[in-house]
């Protein structure tokens, strides 16, 4: 009888707290969490104040000392770095008009997380919506700047020294970029690569190359006093994983090499923010076909140089671009326009971390270890340009779909990943039943999470327009 009584008490308690629970495939359209989020988006007041643009930029070195932890691969063991291949940096570009001043911040780290973000916001004395956080997402950058079980696996043990160094450097870059603003003309280009040419640099790991995100976004800020490049921001969606887990030296991976090459060609500060990297890998050895780190470095530098040559040629001479490489250039420029920055709260479904096709772990357990049921999208509008920073490895396919929608709605969406929170991978619903770690092991919020974020993105842009 005692065993039966204990079973009556503890079996339901075990199921409640551990699982299994049935998988919830309820579509988001009529759920309370989606309705409340959409109501908030509709309440956003559009800023219509146009005025002349000005900008400033800064970069601060963040190369850590040997022996400090590396971030990027849970399988990398040990995680202590043995030196540096590259000097790495935190970079900031501030853009303002007479009403609003926002700073785009990217560091050569894996991703910003809330402890780091909160400390930078506090140290700068700015409001949260005044700093747009992203990263280059290098998998060979400094770690040790976040607490937690999941964070320790990919970033190593917490290091107060490394955390303080990053906070100081990121805060300094933000404030320096705001200290000497110059009048600028903003020039935006989206370089749409042909699938054949893009396959040299990026592929979709779910489809062996099909459905890759072939866009390169470029923002040039031209000093109207000197007619020179004050700063350039670019985004590409290939994961910075040319250097695999065998590499134990600090490196910015291909974004670092790409920024160096473009700085020589264009001048000014050159900043990289990783795009929608969900399922998007570089074409090369990287983690999956490791030979030697030397081989990986050669492939990385070759790819970066080729990309830099293509980008600089496209920007300077778009009338004579090789049609085998470029489908089209979407472009827009302005000296006088609106700026608006919004932190958009996003309510989420309960987690669906599957252990079989139809069963999941208890959402209470997943929430306690990983993430609560709310997050945000950071959206910045500069005229027709819409930056959207997501709390995840955001799907390249979703970003490509949003760009097509933008082409039809007189808007230029620009998706970046890693806004300061992390939800895992956000993927289209059509891939949910695939047996792949991207769609199962790191897809925490169910079948409809990707479609939900895509719909919210369209609604945000429509509200800000």
Image (cartoon, rainbow, N blue to C red):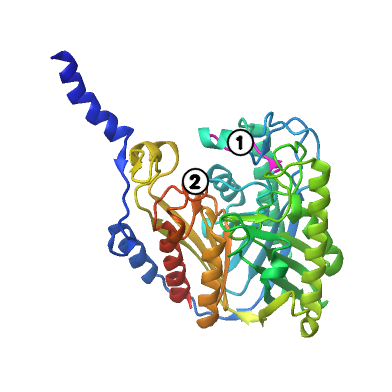
Nearest the eye: 209 or 177 = 209
- What mark, if any, has residue 442 been given in the picture? 2
Q: What stretch is highlighted in magenta?
A: 140-148
Q: Does the magenta stretch include residue 209?
A: no
Nearest the eye: 302 or 48 = 302
Locate the N terminus by quadrant. top left
Q: Quadrant of residue 54?
A: bottom right
- The image position of residue 423, as x and y in percent, is 48, 49
User: SS of the residue at dot 1?
Assistant: loop
Residue 148 visible in rendering: no
- The image position of residue 379, as x and y in percent, is 52, 65
Which residue shows up at 74% across the image and 80% down it?
Answer: 323
Is 448 placed above or below 402 here?
Answer: above
Which residue shows up at 68% across the image and 79% down it?
Answer: 329
Marker count (numbered):
2
Instruction: Provide the major secondary structure of the magenta segment.
Output: loop
- The image position of residue 193, as x and y in percent, is 69, 72
Nearest the eye: 74 or 50 = 74
Is 245 placed above or below 310 here?
Answer: above
How crowded is the residue under tag 2: few (<14 C-alpha within 10 Å), some, or many (20+)? some
Relative to residue 267, is residue 238 drawn left or right? left
- What mark, if any, has residue 74 been given in the picture? 1
Residue 69 visible in rendering: yes
Sequence-first disc among 2 and 1: 1
């Amino acid at each position: 009888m005692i065993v039966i009584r204990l079973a009556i008490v503890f079996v339901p308690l075990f199921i409640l707290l551990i699982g299994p629970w049935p998988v919830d495939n309820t579509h988001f359209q009529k759920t309370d969490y989606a309705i409340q989020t959409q109501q908030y988006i509709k309440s956003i007041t559009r800023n219509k104040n146009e005025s002349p643009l000005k900008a400033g930029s800064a970069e601060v070195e963040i190369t850590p000392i040997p022996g400090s932890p590396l971030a990027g691969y849970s399988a990398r063991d040990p995680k202590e770095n043995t030196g540096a291949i590259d000097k790495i940096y935190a970079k900031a570009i501030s853009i303002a008009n007479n009403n609003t001043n926002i700073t785009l911040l990217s560091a050569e780290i894996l991703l910003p997380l809330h402890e780091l973000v909160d400390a930078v916001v506090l140290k700068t004395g700015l409001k949260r919506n005044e700093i747009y956080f992203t990263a280059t997402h290098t998998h060979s950058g400094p770690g040790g700047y976040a607490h937690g079980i999941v964070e320790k696996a990919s970033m190593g043990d917490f290091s107060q020294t490394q955390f303080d160094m990053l906070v100081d450097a990121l805060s300094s870059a933000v404030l320096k970029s705001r200290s000497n603003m110059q009048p600028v003309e903003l020039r935006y280009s989206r370089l749409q690569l042909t699938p054949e040419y893009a396959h040299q640099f990026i592929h979709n790991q779910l489809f062996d190359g099909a459905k890759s995100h072939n866009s390169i976004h470029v923002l040039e800020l031209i000093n109207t006093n000197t007619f020179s490049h004050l700063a350039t921001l670019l985004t590409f969606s290939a994961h910075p994983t040319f250097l695999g887990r065998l590499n134990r030296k600090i490196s910015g991976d291909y974004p670092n090499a790409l920024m160096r090459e473009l700085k020589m060609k264009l001048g000014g500060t050159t900043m990289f923010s990783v795009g929608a990297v969900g399922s998007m890998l570089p074409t090369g050895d990287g983690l999956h076909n490791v030979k030697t780190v030397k081989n990986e470095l050669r492939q990385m530098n070759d790819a970066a140089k080729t990309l830099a040559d293509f980008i600089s040629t496209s920007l300077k001479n778009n009338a004579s671009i090789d049609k085998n490489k470029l489908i089209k250039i979407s472009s827009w420029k302005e000296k006088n326009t609106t700026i608006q920055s919004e932190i958009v709260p996003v309510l989420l479904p309960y987690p669906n971390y599957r252990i079989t096709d139809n069963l999941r772990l208890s959402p209470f357990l997943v929430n306690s270890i990983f993430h609560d049921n709310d997050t945000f999208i950071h959206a910045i509008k500069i005229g027709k340009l819409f930056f959207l920073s997501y709390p995840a490895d955001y799907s390249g396919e979703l970003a490509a779909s949003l760009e097509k929608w933008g082409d039809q709605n007189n808007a230029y969406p620009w998706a970046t990943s890693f806004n300061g929170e992390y939800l895992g991978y956000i993927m289209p619903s059509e891939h949910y039943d695939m047996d792949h770690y991207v769609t199962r092991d790191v897809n925490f919020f169910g079948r409809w999470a990707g479609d939900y974020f895509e719909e919210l993105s369209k609604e945000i842009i429509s509200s800000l327009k």
